[in-house]
Image (cartoon, rainbow, N blue to C red):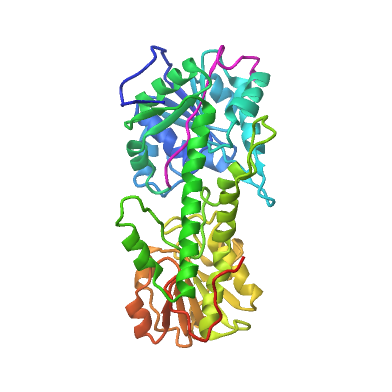
């Protein structure tokens, strides 16, 4: 592996100015903007006609990134950015094709490559000799060099590594700070061969200000992203295990973790009521169930599997903590604060709010949800029952699931019947909760009533 600083290229390959970005979601559109702002003519591709119409009218359908609407408007006016649903035609005009189409896991947690395969087939239909194709979507190891390469070659009639360049470079950004992350985090790049790697490094060196980190293959680059996200999931699971232990022994896990992390080799995350989002609860399954290679004896990854079980199980554990305080929840009203998976981000992918709602309903509770980022109609469409102010007097427990800024000053006074508040994300003021006459608890605070059963899981 080699690291190349911005501007240092290991190839003299010349690229034309047009880039096709396939997939204009929360990451794809900012990438298109990034490339266009660095002198490329960008054709964005998406199957959603509303997305195409919005961008071509000079507006951004992605609003989480500061200033993106103004950026899109200017780039469209300048002719540097346009959008189309005709992927093959856009690719036909491009010397660089960046693919960032979603890959999901199904209900059985198996990796579903159908959308990526379909998009790849359309890319192959327009692929021209000498072009570079780069996948940025997180993928199981072996996917770029295996099934996706095969689809590209079959549909284009070209050979990867000879007639066109093929590379993989995982996106490493977070919604709400994508442009900052693009300028900060090293860009990991792997190629099918040396020439493919050089072509990809040449492109990214020209459109990014961050250093480029070169890997030995596309497989290695795919592995990098899976390591990053799985590490976080396993780390959070360990923190959650510590929290359960702390509760069973009436210790304060947050104070203990903070002290432990003053040692430079300790980097324990914070426990909570679950893990949501497109990445952390999904990508471990790319290691567990997503092997794309031909190795029959691929070792089973047991630790990521167990981490997933622990983190998904924190919703039920949170409900146990509440029942330890106020008894059975059957027929009692509970309010969830925040349905988004992350603070101040309007996205509910794999949100822990759904797991909490399911666990509460299993116990017979009446569950209401609030989120300042969604209106009542949107909450209902997502499967939640919107909270109405006139119900405040019925609520007997509150769970803070998302650390939205709005909740730092949440008014608890109307909740006259509320007995306990579980702050799952450290967003509420303990002082204000207790001043309202309510019991304030956190996962792992050790404040389990003496008469309550031991809550640590036995295996």
Residue 360 location, quadrant: bottom right
Where is residue 447 drawn, in percent x and y? 43, 79
Residue 418 higher or lower than 316, as above or below: below
Residue 353 location, quadrant: bottom right
Magenta segment main secondary structure: loop
Residue 355 is one of the magenta-drawn residues: no
Q: Find the magenta span and give its range.
A: 156-174
Residue at the location (63% across, 21% down)? 125
Q: How many marks?
A: 0
Residue 157 is one of the magenta-drawn residues: yes
Residue 186 location, quadrant: top left
Where is residue 211 drawn, in percent x and y? 33, 30
Where is residue 237 drawn, in percent x and y? 50, 58
Query: Quick check: 446 left or right of 333?
Result: left
Comparing 361 with 286, the one in front is 286
Residue at the location (41% across, 79% down)? 440
Residue 267 higher or lower than 427, as above or below: above
Residue at the location (38% across, 77% down)? 411
Asked if residue 279 shows in the view, the reply is yes
Residue 80 higher or lower than 280, as above or below: above
Where is residue 345 drawn, in percent x and y? 44, 55
Asked if residue 374 shows in the view, the reply is no
Quadrant location, the C terminus = bottom right
Quadrant location, the N terminus = top left
Query: Quick check: 190 left or right of 429?
Result: right
Comparing 81 with 274, the one in front is 274
């Amino acid at each position: 592996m080699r690291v190349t600083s911005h501007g240092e290229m290991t190839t003299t390959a010349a690229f034309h100015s047009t880039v096709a970005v396939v997939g204009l979601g929360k990451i794809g559109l900012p990438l298109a903007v990034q490339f266009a702002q660095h002198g490329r003519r960008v054709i964005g591709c998406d199957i959603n006609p509303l997305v195409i119409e919005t961008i071509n009218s000079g507006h951004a359908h992605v609003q989480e990134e500061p200033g993106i609407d103004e950026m899109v408007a200017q780039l469209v006016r300048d002719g540097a950015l346009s959008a189309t649903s005709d992927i093959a035609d856009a690719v036909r005009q491009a010397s660089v094709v960046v693919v960032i189409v979603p890959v999901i896991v199904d209900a059985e947690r198996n990796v579903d490559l159908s959308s990526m395969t379909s998009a790849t087939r359309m890319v192959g239909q327009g692929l021209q000799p000498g072009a570079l194709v780069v996948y940025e979507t997180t993928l199981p190891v072996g996917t770029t060099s295996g099934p996706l390469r095969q689809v590209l070659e079959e549909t284009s009639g070209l050979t990867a590594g000879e007639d066109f360049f093929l590379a993989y470079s995982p996106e490493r950004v977070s919604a709400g700070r994508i442009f900052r992350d693009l300028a900060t985090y090293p860009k990991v790049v792997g190629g099918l061969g040396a020439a493919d790697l050089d072509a990809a490094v040449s492109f990214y060196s020209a459109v990014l200000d961050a250093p480029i980190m070169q890997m030995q293959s596309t497989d290695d680059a795919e592995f990098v992203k899976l390591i990053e996200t799985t590490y976080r999931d396993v780390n959070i699971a360990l923190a959650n295990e510590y929290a359960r232990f702390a509760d069973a022994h009436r210790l304060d896990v947050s104070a203990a973790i903070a002290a432990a992390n003053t040692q430079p080799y300790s980097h324990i995350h914070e426990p909570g009521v679950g893990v949501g989002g497109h990445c952390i609860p999904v990508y471990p399954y790319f290691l567990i169930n997503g092997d794309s290679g031909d190795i029959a004896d691929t070792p089973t990854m047991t630790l990521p599997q167990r981490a997933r079980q622990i983190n998904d199980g924190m919703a039920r554990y949170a409900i146990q903590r509440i029942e330890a305080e106020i008894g059975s929840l059957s027929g009692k009203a509970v309010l969830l604060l925040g349905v988004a998976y992350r603070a101040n981000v309007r996205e509910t992918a794999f949100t822990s709010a759904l797991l909490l709602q399911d666990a509460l309903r299993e116990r017979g509770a009446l569950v209401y949800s609030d989120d300042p980022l969604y209106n009542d109609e949107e909450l209902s469409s997502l499967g939640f029952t919107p909270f109405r102010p006139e119900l405040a007097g019925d609520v007997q427990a509150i769970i803070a699931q998302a650390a939205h800024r709005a909740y730092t000053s949440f008014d608890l006074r109307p909740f006259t019947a509320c007995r306990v508040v579980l702050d799952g994300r450290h967003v509420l003021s303990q002082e204000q909760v207790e001043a309202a006459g309510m019991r304030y608890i956190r996962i792992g605070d050790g404040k389990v009533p003496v008469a309550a059963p031991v809550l640590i899981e036995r295996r």
